[in-house]
Image (cartoon, rainbow, N blue to C red):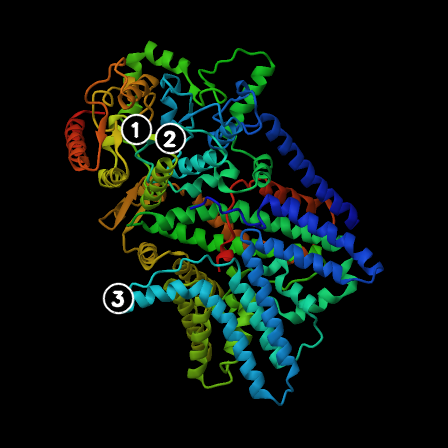
Amino acid sequence: MNNEKTWFYSALGIIVLGFLIVGLANYVLDPYGLFRKDFSWQFVEPNNDFIKPRYVTEHPLRYDCFVFGSSRANNIDVRKIKGYSCYNMFCNGEVPHEHLGNLKYMLKKGVKIRLVLVQLDDFSFRTDPAQRLNDPLRHPYPPVLNQHLLPYYLRYLFSLHAQHIMSPVIEGYWGKIMGKKDTRVGYYDVTNTGQILVPGVDKQIEENADAHRKDPRFTEKIEGATGDNMKGTINDLTQMVRLLKAHGIRSIFFMSPPYKTWFVDLDMDAFSRFERELAKLTDFYDFSGINSITKDPLNYYNPSHFRVPIGDMMLARILGDKTVRVPSDFGVLVTSKDVEAHLRDLRQQVAEEESIRTLTPK
Amino acid sequence: MHRGSPLAVLFNSHEYLFLFLPLTLIVYFLINPWARWARSECLSEFWLIGASLFFYGWSEPKYALLLVCLVLFNFSVAAGLNRFEPRQSVKRKILLIFGIAADVALLGYYKYADFAITNVNYLFHAQFLLRSVAVPMGLSFVTFIQISYLVDTYRNPTKEYDLLTYGLFSTYFPYILAGPIVRHSEIMPQLKKAAKKAAEYHNLSVGLYLISIGIFKKVVVADRLGEWASDGFAAAPPMNFLYAWVSSLCYTFQIYFDFSGYTDMAIGTALMFNIRLPINFNSPYKALDIQDFWRRWHITLGRFLREYIYIPLGGNRVGEARVYFNLMVTFIVCGIWHGAGWTFVFWGFLHGAALVVHRAWKKMGGKMPTFVAWLLTFNFVNMAWVFFRARSWDEALKVLAAMWGLNGLALPEGWGHALNFLKSGYILFLPWKEIMLGSRDACIWVPFALAVCLFLKNSNQMSENFKPVWRSLPVIAAGAYAALQLFRVNEFIYFNF
């Protein structure tokens, strides 16, 4: 091949062909669910931070109550919230910066909101929101960022997504096309509750309770997030509280309860600073700490994620539902007046747990 | 805060590669024959200026307006310089100083005001508020190009250029964000040539070839090394010896592959429009002394500093002590130009000092074996980059202390059997995972990057030897592969300067 014209068009051909193949595959397999209407074809976690703001703003009058939070908030079953039509906005690793952005966008798009539940985590003040811009699982919906959709779609379509994501997607598609039995233990209820419903996992845990309690993940040391975005997070929460008040929206903030080993391994100084700042902004329920719920692995899928029945107890506590039995040591209402006493209690619980833990062989 | 900050059109983005560049190129070559036929050849210049302003202003339209004002201002000053007779040297000099001062003031306003306020606050225990103004991308490059035009006009009138050509020269998108720092005499005549306005398959092919090399260097090599460098520099102290060396070397190679990758894309892009840009890199890590390094690294910046700072200060036509002073001033300016921070100033100081030592050594007739010369130069450059990369003195000293072995030496556990006699309080044998944390693969990439820098042809040589044969196509495939990794967008390092 000596002709420069032929070479140039061959080179262009290689580029165009490569991009067409990848683009077409990404469009059809749609690993993060951006183009999908039917989520029964979803084989890995979709990008909830993209699809949920889009979905609720396309149906602005369908819901009047929203739960914001990280993947832990997935286990707050919105069907248990009576008197409201509620949607779970949870997204993997989401922090208040995204809650605020989504809330502003939803209000701008005319979504009528009466109640907002905001779940916060021990890592809420640690994650730099900018990191999400490079993550296809967590990238926000571009209009929320005042960005055009087209550049994002180009990025999404013309990218080689991670092998650990594409493998199960291809496997799932292949199995479904070939008529193999669907072995998934849960499903993505995006167009109804917004939750990932995992009855299969709950069944497995209950059938193998002893084995689950002995799962080594519940005794291992936890390497939690270490970043510092305290200032940014408090600023976002301040704006969020003001925005909710300005729109007359009832709001409840609450801290999620990780399993005790997770909590013991936290940096308590940083966590205390966060709760202290939060208490200045709003009262909140704190379900974390060492209590009868966080001590039992059976209440957890893993050390980070509590199970749905625990989510039901949390809802009962914060909404005052007396029909659900909630242990008295689970969930404390924290105000600016008693936050110091509460933090002292938490430190005491951690100290006691640590003293036992050192005596417990792993 | 990332809400509301739309992405800039970057060379390493899908918008640029698949929308902006092809569209600009196709329309440009479609317009040209028609414009010639209609005798309105300025249409193609208008098109490129429009495209360039769109490119520059995409992230923040007001910056495109700023660029337009800057161009109009400098063109007016140059027109004033051209109007005066050469004998009116005082008036011309005053006008030149006014023009340069205004350009520097603009740069100072955006880039150095907070640095100055921070220092004033520190020195006088004052409480002046920081302004936190975002610096328009590539402002340092834009102002240097403008200053060079004013000085060149002062030296030799430039009456032959009209505003349109000057406007295109000053806004041309391939080099506007991060160079090369071009001079009017090498670009404007090309922009004026009608023959340059027809598509040439040779230039299109070599341009595409260079863009492919550039994007591969950036996305596959530099961004990967950059992650390890970032982890290392952000790691909690104390760092261990090996980890510190690998982290610093990762940055040394990251900045080369990042900036030379960008330059390849800039040169390739311009070449597709039949414009030849000056080269900016020539295998800098092969340098055998620090002077040699600056002849190979960011060549157009070195040229600017030499011609517009070092020579006006007297260059090497003055006494030896004054030459040393000139070198130090030139490189301290170089440091400040790179960033508003004392670590950048110190990086410039180190390079100035190295050039002084090198000059003194040469004066004394000093020589050393080639390998030792290379090792010394490379390690000096590598250690100096630590100050360039670090976000603070503490961070730089943390890495350097570990590199100098002040935190002891941690060796891989596996070596413990053979080297057990070395075990002491100073030398420990630890699992590889604990020594390198998450950067174990970097130990493979760093020698690989070094081998590429030392033993393979650089992109200038590759493009000069380009032949339209099948075996050149894998380079295109590698570029396409890199372009498919663009979900993760990392800015080019030099966009910040």
Q: Which chain contains the residue that carries disc 3?
A: B
Return the residue nearer the eye: A267 or A12: A267
Do dots 1 and 2 share one subunit? yes
Q: Secondary structure at mark 3?
A: loop
Going from the N terminus, do you reach mark 1 or mark 2 first? 2
Q: CA distance from mark 1 to mark 3?
A: 43 Å
Q: Secondary structure at mark 1?
A: loop
Return the residue nearer the eye: A262 or A270: A270
* Residue picked out by circle 3: B125
Q: Amino acid at mark 1?
A: Ser
| Res B45 label | none
> From this viewpoint, is residue B298 visible?
no
Q: Which chain contains the residue that carries disc 1?
A: A
Could you tell me residue A6's position as x and y percent?
A: 78, 45
Is residue A149 left or right of A77 when viewed as pictured? right
Give the farthest residue toward the right.
B37
Q: Residues within 10 Å of mark 3 (few under 14, many from 20)?
A: few
* Residue picked out by circle 2: A69
Do dots 1 and 3 share one subunit? no
| Res A256 label | 1
Is the residue under label 2 in contact with that under label 1 (CB below 8 Å)? Answer: yes
Q: Amino acid at mark 2?
A: Gly
Could you tell me residue A145's position as x and y percent?
A: 49, 41
Could you tell me residue A33's position as x and y percent?
A: 54, 27
Q: Secondary structure at mark 2?
A: loop
Task: State the image quarter where residue B434 is shown.
Answer: top left
Q: CA distance from mark 3 to mark 2?
A: 43 Å
